[in-house]
Image: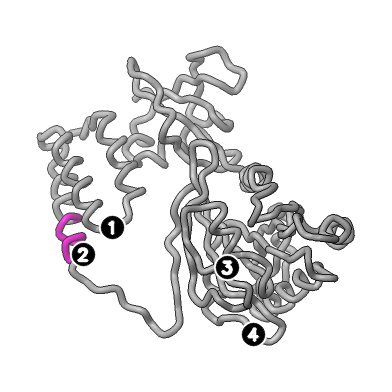
Amino acid sequence: MPANLPPEYYAIERRYRLAKSPQEKITIVRELLAVMPKHKGTDKLQAELRGRIARLNREAQKKPVKRGFSYHVRKEGAAQLVLLGPPNAGKSQTLASLTNATPEVTPYPFATRTPLVGMMPFENISYQLVDTPSIAPDFMEPWLVDIIRNTDLVLLIVDLTEENPGKGIDTVMVRLAQVKIRLRGEITEGEESEEPPAFVCKKTIVVANKNDLPQAQQRFGALKDVCAQRFPLISISAKQPRGLEEMKSKIHKLLDIVRVYTKAPGRPMDRDDPVILKKGDTVMDAAQAIHKDLLRDLKYARLWGSNKFDGQRVERNYILEDEDMVEFHI
């Protein structure tokens, strides 16, 4: 017997995936149980949700365990961005200016000793920023390797007050090459396969900071030559601030994020909570992101946007574009 779950169930399920604490998740699971129709077709799902509540209760009673010097930053938002750079480049100031995080911003190097996280708003979504300890020619925190390998994008911060800001790029790249990480600009599937065995290639933007200080423009011109054909490059002042909105737009474009808005038949569109997809994803991918049962039952969709007629019927394999609006039919 089919479950025949209502649209409200799928909306609540999406909130569950964004929840952070076990207590918050427990509250949402109870909401799922409340809106779910009670019949034989949902018996198994009801049991699964009650089991989930039991597991979350056990998890809430556990104390977090730090194992050695390893850190794991759970991804949140549309994508995770890691701030890397040499000492005193301005990573912590960049985090503070772009998010609500309050890192210790100091004139001396190596003030950041652990990962610091903040959420950077962009239009109607947010990106997660992770500040990290500086990378020097003779030192890099060993635990930083796993965080870089797990991230979606690297923001390589360099200092325009340095006589040779390109030296900071070389310092970071040499250290990362020693742990089999390669930083690149635009990465295609073919290019990534050409990397040496066991290497991880990470998409990177070079962020030239402190463009409000003397000689910064001259040094930025020289840095363009260093980054030509290698990295996208943006000039900012994290302290002023200056150039931050342009940087956000460049990040969004480079990550190929596609925001899709959904609606139930006969109901208004929800523009506050888009489904986050990647370029090339389809109606089926959007359904899967909401709930596997929706994908299983999906017959077709109606589309608003993408230069289509409003409400035009599209098939399950239709490729979606940023800010398309989709109505699912099961």
Looking at the rendering, which quadrant does residue 46 occupy? top left
**Gap in Å between the C-alphas at discs 4 and 3?**
16 Å
Where is mark 3, residue-wise? Answer: 148
Instruction: Please rate how many residues cluster around mark 1, counting C-alpha atoms within 10 Å: few if below 14, some from 14 to 19, many from 20.
Output: few
**Gap in Å between the C-alphas at discs 2 and 3?**
28 Å
Where is mark 1, residue-wise? Answer: 21
Looking at the rendering, which quadrant does residue 83 occupy? bottom right
Question: Magenta stretch mostly in which secondary structure?
Answer: helix
Q: Amino acid at mark 2?
A: Ala
Q: Nearer the viewer, residue 79 or 288?
A: 79
In the picture, the quarter occupied by the N terminus is top left
- Of helix, strand and loop, which one carries label 4? loop
Q: Amino acid at mark 1?
A: Ser
Q: Earlier in the sequence, mark 1 or mark 4?
A: 1
The image shows residue 11, relative to residue 140, as above or below, that is above
- Magenta stretch in the rendered image: 52-58
Q: Earlier in the sequence, mark 1 or mark 3?
A: 1
The image shows residue 188, relative to residue 69, as above or below, that is above
- Per the rendering, the mark at residue 139 is 4
Please name the residue shown 48% across and 25% down the image.
325
